[in-house]
Amino acid sequence: MTFHDANQPRILVTGGTGKTGGRVAARLQQAGHPVRIGSRTAEIPFDWTDRNTWSAALAGIDSVYLAFQPDLAVPGAPDVIQAFSVAAKRSGVRKLVLLSGRGEPEAVECEEIVRHSGLDWTIVRCSFFAQNFSEGAFTDYILAGQVALPNGDVPEPFVHADDIADVAVAALTEAGHTGELYELTGPRALSFAQATAEIAEALGREIAYIPITRTEFVGGLTEYQVPADVVSLLDYLFGTILDGRNSATTDGVQRALGRAPKDFRDYAAEAAASGAWSVEEAAVN
């Protein structure tokens, strides 16, 4: 979009069509902030894999919501974040708000790069997104009526994407968030089996949880022709990160926003009511 008000900070939202970026961009636009969507299909294209697109996307930008795809845990991510931080500073960007992953050593390395970028920063470190069940990797499992995952008994305090977006928008538009690390979780931890049961309850239909081994998980993903880099990432998350290290809840949402985080049961009810798991709608699409 065209920037009209020179006094308002101009914000680039990378991943601007994704689970969190789309919400961040919508909130900023609704509040009247000048926003540039960072995506390959945007008017000014932005592509993490094509550094030639970065300078045009960063031109005239004051702040960036930095949501790296596919994840900060993938090989090479720190090099990309380092190069992007340098490019942002060179372009005159003043602040970075980094979406980070909880319990990932590689993500911590990226956080340190942002901390030492010479720019103002806020880090938004998140647990598993609740929306992965309705807008991501596990949607088809819910539609099929059975969720087959490894480590299904490990508790995870799923965080609502709306909470992530609200914290990011606050960090991008309000004073008082610079230099803060907000670790975001939901208010309680559920295993994937328990989360599946709560979705089933919200939908009023049976959804089976099937515990499988890590090898079976990778084999199933491969059989469904999931891209190899996504298979590798999911295998890492379930095989390494989902070991209980992230089971504790935190007060990040409360600290950033002064309110409690959204509960998974509320998320499940909202998603069910929205038709996110409508079998008929999925068949049409």
Image: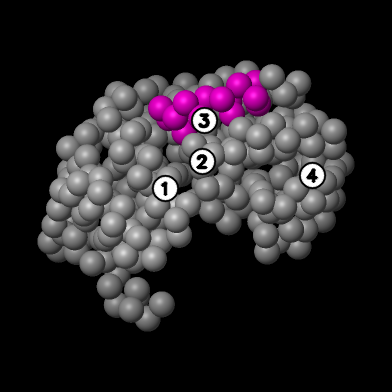
Q: Which secondary structure lies at badge 3?
A: helix
Q: Which secondary structure lies at badge 4?
A: helix
On residue 74, the disc is 2
In this view of the protein, which residue sits in the foreground, 132 or 5? 132
Label 3 and label 2: CA atoms lie apart by 9 Å
Q: Badge 3, how many Cα within 10 Å: few under 14, some, many 20+?
A: many
Residue sitting at x 40%, y 55%: 136
Q: Is residue 111 magenta?
A: yes
Question: Mark 4 or mark 2: which comes first in sequence?
Answer: 4
Q: Quadrant of residue 123?
A: top right
Residue sitting at x 28%, y 59%: 220
- Please state which of the two labelled residues, at mark 3 or mark 1, is closer to the viewer: 1
Q: Quadrant of residue 154?
A: top left
Locate residue 185 relative to residue 258 in the image: left or right: left
Q: Which secondary structure lies at badge 1?
A: helix
> In the rendered picture of this protein, how many numbered marks are placed on residues?
4
Q: What is the magenta segment's predominant secondary structure?
A: helix
Q: Which residue is mark 3?
A: 107
In this view of the protein, which residue sits in the foreground, 59 or 243? 243
Q: Which residue is mark 1?
A: 232
